[in-house]
Image (cartoon, coloured by chain):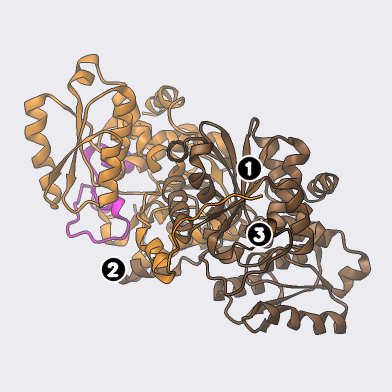
Chain colours: A orange, B brown
Amino acid sequence: MFREVKAAYERIRNVVNTTPVMTSSTLNQLAGCSCFFKCENFQKTGSFKFRGAYNALSQLSHEQKKRGVITHSSGNHAQALALAARILGIKAIVVMPEDAAATKVSATRNYGAEIVTCGSHPEDREKAVEPLRKQYGYTLIHPSNNLSIIAGAGTAAYELMKQVDGLSYVFCPVGGGGLLSGTAIATKGLTPDIQVIGVEPKNADDAYRSLKAGKIIRVTNVKTVADGLRTSLGNHTFDVIKRNVDHIITVSEEEIIDAAQLIWERMKLVVEPSGAVSFAGVLSLRRRLRSRSVGVILSGGNIDTASFFETFKQHLGTVESETKSTP
Amino acid sequence: MFREVKAAYERIRNVVNTTPVMTSSTLNQLAGCSCFFKCENFQKTGSFKFRGAYNALSQLSHEQKKRGVITHSSGNHAQALALAARILGIKAIVVMPEDAAATKVSATRNYGAEIVTCGSHPEDREKAVEPLRKQYGYTLIHPSNNLSIIAGAGTAAYELMKQVDGLSYVFCPVGGGGLLSGTAIATKGLTPDIQVIGVEPKNADDAYRSLKAGKIIRVTNVKTVADGLRTSLGNHTFDVIKRNVDHIITVSEEEIIDAAQLIWERMKLVVEPSGAVSFAGVLSLRRRLRSRSVGVILSGGNIDTASFFETFKQHLGTVESETKSTP
């Protein structure tokens, strides 16, 4: 599938942001290795998801484009698909659970998608999608278990390989497995001896368990601060990961939060907990990584900071705007 | 003084970070103009202050270096001076008020400075500095009212001018006025017709009032979320600003907080409220800036996010680390 990643890159490179690779001497000291952070929080719509969404939509037939697309997502894929569809002039329907963050719902709507609300159980999403898809002929663009989504997601690591030489490892978060699948294909396709490590919240360790069992195991009642990683692997992502990923490791909620806070405070980057899981994995394996060059995919930065800023406002009697000019 | 900024740039360019200029189509839409954000939050020690500190220290005589330096600061200058001194092998004493943020005190200590605690009133700082300076012969490096500090601070705008063509305005926060002075000298020195706008919290509007009155007016009982901008102008900075800055405008606490939140959420950049004041100014003048290219100095990103991450931890029963590997 490496060819598909290369083709995806040529297809989307003029539309996606070429995100920067950033470094921090403080975090290198903490991790005991040289970390190269691939900053997909700077991607359009705030996460890597835009790469796959745009790649998938741009390959639809004229007929499919005319009918429109549908997906289900509580967050980053929703916004990515909505923007990609708007750019390509395609109607997009996004099924979102009733407990999705209000900011993500409004962002998705602002990008021009039509929102359909469903219940909060995972199976509610597909139940809401199916009748609409059948009735209107919409094409389903699954958030992760879709080969075009995987190939698009892989362009982040493909770009990283072109930006940084000499990596020994690439660390990547695992949710539905689309990003990890694409990352593994791109990395191994270019430099087979780079180790690809998937990092998963301990509280949502379906990929870890699935690889161990040799079959897809779904986790239920998932409760993790890494809200983008609650979903389980699908048949395509399981297959790619099984064949191309070297290790899956798990990290605790505390490790995830600490990793995110380090990236915020030391690198000045807003990264969401799901996006910082890869760096939590680096820290947990630091003894093995000594002095190596390590790629770290920061997958996204969509997080509601209203509560934090609310605290500021409460601390201060805010003053009405009085803008003046002098001399 | 433009010559001094150019000399400072040559002196420090291999040690300071060349910080990136970033853009956001969403924020451009909101502001109705093209904003070019000069990201000094990515500078060493997290703010532009490192530029001036390193420039000042590297010009000391051998004798001065041997004796050591002293300053007073509750925050960014403290850290910057501490690191610059460490790099140059100079002993640094930093007088910090007893109510300084614990994270800033520990960061300053971690960079190797010796901390002396003083009372929380502004005049307590100089009272603590003077006897030490006299007794040990330390050289005082004032946080803003010092020509080498001003020239070093100006290298941020100097770099910005080299990175972006066609700016019509540069917006810059005003505290003690070191950054605004340097910004004005660099900007006018390279392109005199670019308008330089200083932006100040309404609650700490000493620069606005001083320019109006034609003499330095100090504000007392300053209470603003932009903690880096509580200080007043000095004779050098007042003089430079009077002659080179086109306008000083003021913004409310609410405008500052909203600007910071926009930069966090839309640009994924951690910027401190003091650093976001410049963008608050852009938003407040948006009607005048239509479609122009505007440089915006984001002066720093040092902010304690512990309370925000604490909330995450409280929401979740955190699980102990259990790192495993498979297959």
Question: At 75% across and 83% down in the image, what residue appears?
Answer: B127
Quadrant into which the N terminus of chain A falls? top left
Chain identifier of the residue bearing label 3 in the image: B
Badge 3 amino acid? Ala
Task: Give the x, y percent position of residue A69.
Answer: 20, 28
Q: Are marks 3 and 2 on the same chain?
A: yes
Q: State left or right for residue A263 relative to residue A131.
A: right
Residue A113 as seen in the image, left or right of residue B188: left
Disc number placed over residue B316 in the picture, else none: 2
Q: Nearer the viewer, mark 1 or mark 3?
A: 3
- At label 2, counting other C-alpha atoms closer than 10 Å, the crowd grade (few under 14, some 14-19, many 20 or more) is few
What is the secondary structure assignment of the residue under circle 2?
loop
- Of residues B164 and B202, the one drawn nearer to the viewer in this rendering: B202
Magenta segment's dominant SS is loop
Where disc 3 sits, the SS reads helix
Residue stretch rendered in magenta on the structure = A212-241
CA–CA distance between discs 1 and 3?
17 Å
In this view, B162 is above or below A12: below
Quadrant in which residue B66 is drawn: bottom right
Q: Position of residue B131 (x, y in %)?
A: 81, 84
Q: Which mark is residue B170?
A: 1
- The mark nearer the N terminus, 1 or 3, is 1
| Residue B258 screen position, x and y as percent | 43, 54
The residue that disc 3 covers is: B207
- The reply, left or right, for residue B205 in relation to residue B125 is left
**Residue lying at 63% horizontally and 42% vertically, measured from the top left:** B170
Element class at badge 1: strand
